[in-house]
Amino acid sequence: MSRTTVFRATQWVVVLMTAALVVWAAVAHDPRFFGYSLFFSGLVLVASFLRIEAGEASVTFEAAVVFGAIILFHDPDVALVAVFVGCGLHAFYERRKLVALLEPAQLALSYFLVASLYTSAVARDARPMAKVSGYVLLLVGCVVTQLAFASLRRWFDSDVSPVDFRPTLAAQGKTLLLLSPVVGIEVLLFANYGIGGFAIAFLPVLLVAYAMRNESDAERQNAELVRRNRELSILTESSTQILSAEGDAETLKRLMALLSKLAHLKACAVVTWSANPDLPGTVYRFGECLPSDQEILRWVDHAGFAESAPSRAFVFRDEQRRFPLSGGGAIQVLIGIQTPEVIYGILIFETDDSSILKTGSLNLLTLLVNQTALSLQDQLLQSEMRNKTRELEERASTMSTILEVSNSLIGSFDLDGALTRIAQAIRTSLGFEQVVIALLDQKRNELTRRAHAGLDAVWDEAKRKHIPLDEITPMFDADFRVSSSFFVSHKALRQSDHDFFVHHQDSGLMAEEWHENDLLIVPLVSADQLIGYVSVREPHDRRVPTLEKVQTLEVFAVQAVTALQSARQYDEIRRLTYIDSLTPAYNHRFFQEQLGKEIHRHARNGREFALAMLDIDNFKRINDTFGHPVGDEILKALVDELITNARDSDIVSRYGGEEFAIIFPDTPAHSARDAANRLREIIERCEFRISQLHRNLPITISIGVACYPRDGVTNADLIARADSALYWVKKHGKNQVAVAAEIPTVVQLMSS
């Protein structure tokens, strides 16, 4: 059972006991006592209407009647009956409830106790000085008992705050001193004139009450004026303090400073909510806030304030508080921090200052809270505006980058350069630390890294490692799809000898944070065929990219596809321009241009390269025997074999008639001899199928080799030296390879 329950039960016991004592006193005494008691009760009733309310230091005037009756009748019962009946009638008149009898009963008992003390200490026929001493005892006892009852009530209310008795002592002491002469006059006039004289002597109390009421009204008006000035100052200050704050914490801190000026802050808790409903609220604590953050959040959540918070101030006192924040009694104000659009939080404010209950104070508190809500809304809008502006600026920058890349691709047929520009644009505009673009080699069925951004330190090693197609295709799984791209969580990736592979049993997307091993990959598709991919890692904001960012990345991927298609179309056009009209070999014009470029390139790097001139042995006999169409078939078949068995970097060209030229870049003389001899042997072993003759024809070739720079530094010199070596082979049995530097000078001069 709580203290409050015990106290309430005790109060009702006091009321019943007091009522029983009053009834007993009325029955036990003679009718004359009853008549006097009613007379004194009437005067106490009048005195009750003269009461001046001044908070805890209320001023009452019933002592002017009760003290006189105690001295005259020397009986505690007269005080008990007069106070209980007179004050009880006044209390019931004011509140019209039986509970109003609690205070009159307490007051009646206190007077009964001091009267009992007086009658036991002072005899009825005592000398005047003894009665004066007894009167002092009455004064002190009256004050002490009332303070004792007040302290007892605070103890039952569990109010541990320190008690300031000074206002009560000052008010009661001042009143009792002013009433003491009236009590003396009442005693004297009653002795001579009876109750009429007593009533006449009571009249000065009206004058004292009137004077004190005027003084109290003046003090109250002055206090009200001070309060209103303080509220006006707070209101003026709030327009700059709250609305100029930045951030929730600073805004609420300034609100608390203003509320503390409005009413003494005992404890306060503010709970705010973020825009994300999945995140818990944030608790801000001020003063002696006893509950933990978790307890406050649980209560606020249980009350449903996030969905519906009070728009006006709700006030609860002492034990009626919905969720006490502090010990002891307090006034609790509950109000939502909200605008018509959004609920930002809830304010639970506790104070022991009763001035907060005034309508003006509550209205000002509501206004301050509403200003706080507007400030939070303004900060939120400003934050959203800044974010939107930054987003638009980033989008505009990205679009500008896309346009610049698109313009740079126009007329550019350097595929690796174009892909590198796209990779760098992705890194700069979309904020990824690493970008890789890889293309599919359909012959080898593997992907080759062709361009990057952010991998300078490891690029040489990375581009040498080709990725088998069957390792990359599992990443293009529907479980990983985001738009037309694929986000592969680090949980689904495993390291392989080449790079990585997917382990589907551990697949799964991350909600927010980007892990260092996550991968976002965009397939490059042309005519529904995979031709490569773009992969990105390590976003600068450490967040999983939004759908909008993924779609922007796909725009860059389309540019990469366009660049690849343009380069391939250019290569095809270039190939058709420089390819021989009969065979798949390059034509004479391309040969001359490429030979000049190789001379220029090798001059810069200081390396050697070789030129081989070759022709078909006895080709005129084939034409004369089988006809020129068969000769053309032989030429085409020969070129097919040469291109198939040459290196990718080697350039096979038709020099004229049955004579061909092969450029071997970065190849010294001895390596060129070996390469040429290998081709000669391959041709010698071949039997070319001639469909027109329904038979195979064998052929042989003769090859002459010249080397840059030893055999020449111009196109003409190299061609002449290689041709001389070829002439030497023709003169010495054919189906051989000769290196220009190794044949006699006389032969070279004769051929030239």
Image: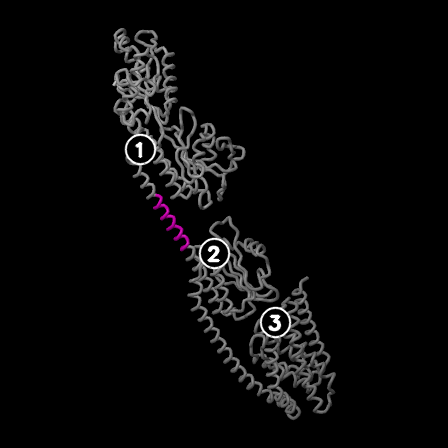
* Secondary structure under the numbered disc 3 in the rendered image: helix
Tag in front: 1 or 2 = 1
The N terminus lies in quadrant: bottom right
Dot 1 crowding, Cα within 10 Å, few <14, some 14–19, many 20+: some
Q: Which residue does the image show at 49% across and 33% down from the upper left?
A: 500
Q: Which residues are magenta?
A: 381-398
> Residue 629 in the image: x percent, y percent?
26, 11
Dot 2 crowding, Cα within 10 Å, few <14, some 14–19, many 20+: many
Q: Is residue 335 above or below residue 495?
A: below
N-terminal-most mark, 2 or 3: 3
> Mark 3 and mark 1: span between their CA atoms?
100 Å
Residue that carries the numbered disc 3 in the rendered image = 100
In the image, taking residue 357 as reference, residue 737 lies left or right, namely: left
Residue that carries the numbered disc 2 in the rendered image = 344
Q: Is residue 573 above or below residue 159?
A: above
In the image, taking residue 189 as reference, residue 490 lies left or right, namely: left
Residue that carries the numbered disc 1 in the rendered image = 413
Of all residues, the one furthest to the bottom in this rendering is 192
Tag in front: 2 or 3 = 2
> Residue 315 in the image: x percent, y percent?
53, 64
Residue 223 falls inside the magenta stretch: no
Say if residue 35 shows up in the picture. Answer: no
Q: Amino acid at mark 2?
A: Tyr
| Location of residue 699 by image quarter | top left
Q: Amino acid at mark 3?
A: Ala
Q: Is residue 492 above or below residue 3?
A: above
